[in-house]
């Protein structure tokens, strides 16, 4: 399905040869964001999703958020109602991928995966979040952290709009997004993007 993401004043820059000759969208980490006027969380993952996966091929320039494992971080993808985020944080000297959802019974549930004390060489990484068999995961480059018990994304998120590059609490992604893929099943992403 095709959805349009736009922004009137704080658009990221399209780079025709962002890295390794591949195109990408460059977010400045200050205020660049893209929002869909029609793509909802239900469109992306299904209504009250209990199984999903999302993968993003990115280049990280910097991570500003130090809020730890929460929904309020430098988001690659999030919703405009604070019910879902695939994001990055840097706290206590460790960079992490964070997948956070608002669960129907448990409240906010967050899974994280450590990228280590420094960003990957060149900043290029493939990150993911997924939910499968009652567990929420976050990972990078084909590996993932321990699953966290979860029931699914609360149905109140179904009508929330999807946005790219902006998290809650004024945190924005600083880097390049090459591709984002979402599925309505929680299969571990094994294919290269």
Image (spheres, rainbow, N blue to C red):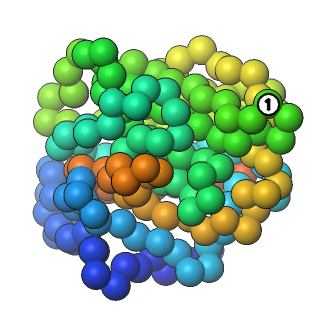
Q: Identify the residue under disc 1.
A: 106
For image coordinates 20% across by 40% down, the residue present is: 62
Instruction: Judge left or right: residue 178 versus residue 14.
Output: right
Above or below, 7 relative to 129: below
Number of other residues with Cα within 10 Å of mark 1, as a class: few under 14, some 14 to 19, many 20 or more: few
Q: Which residue is at the far right?
A: 105
For image coordinates 25% across by 16% down, the residue present is: 93
Residue 92: x and y, percent?
Answer: 30, 15
> Does residue 60 appear anywhere in the picture?
yes
Above or below, 30 relative to 74: below
Instruction: Judge left or right: residue 107 versus residue 129.
Output: right
For image coordinates 67% across by 30% down, the residue present is: 109
Instruction: Judge left or right: residue 74 versus residue 112.
Output: left
Residue 16: x and y, percent?
Answer: 17, 69
For image coordinates 60% across by 29% down, the residue present is: 110
Q: Nearer the viewer, residue 116 or 156?
A: 156
Residue 46: x and y, percent?
Answer: 77, 58
Instruction: Judge left or right: residue 190 versus residue 149.
Output: left
Q: Quadrant of the N terminus?
A: bottom right
Above or below, 139 relative to 84: above
């Amino acid at each position: 399905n095709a959805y349009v993401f736009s922004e009137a004043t704080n658009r990221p820059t399209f780079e025709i040869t962002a890295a390794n000759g591949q195109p990408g969208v460059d977010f400045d980490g200050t205020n660049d964001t893209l929002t869909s006027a029609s793509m909802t969380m239900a469109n992306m993952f299904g209504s009250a999703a209990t199984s999903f996966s999302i993968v993003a091929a990115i280049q990280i320039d910097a991570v500003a958020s130090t809020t730890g494992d929460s929904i309020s971080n430098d988001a690659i993808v999030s919703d405009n109602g604070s019910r879902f985020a695939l994001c990055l944080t840097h706290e206590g000297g460790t960079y992490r991928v964070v997948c956070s959802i608002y669960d129907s019974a448990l409240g906010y549930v967050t899974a994280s995966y450590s990228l280590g004390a420094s960003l990957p060489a060149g900043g290029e990484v493939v990150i993911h979040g997924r939910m499968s068999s009652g567990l929420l995961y976050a990972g990078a480059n084909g590996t993932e952290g321990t699953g966290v018990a979860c029931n699914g994304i609360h149905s109140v998120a179904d009508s929330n709009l999807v946005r790219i590059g902006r998290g809650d609490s004024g945190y924005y992604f600083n880097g390049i997004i090459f591709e984002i893929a979402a599925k309505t099943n929680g299969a571990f992403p094994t294919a290269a993007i």
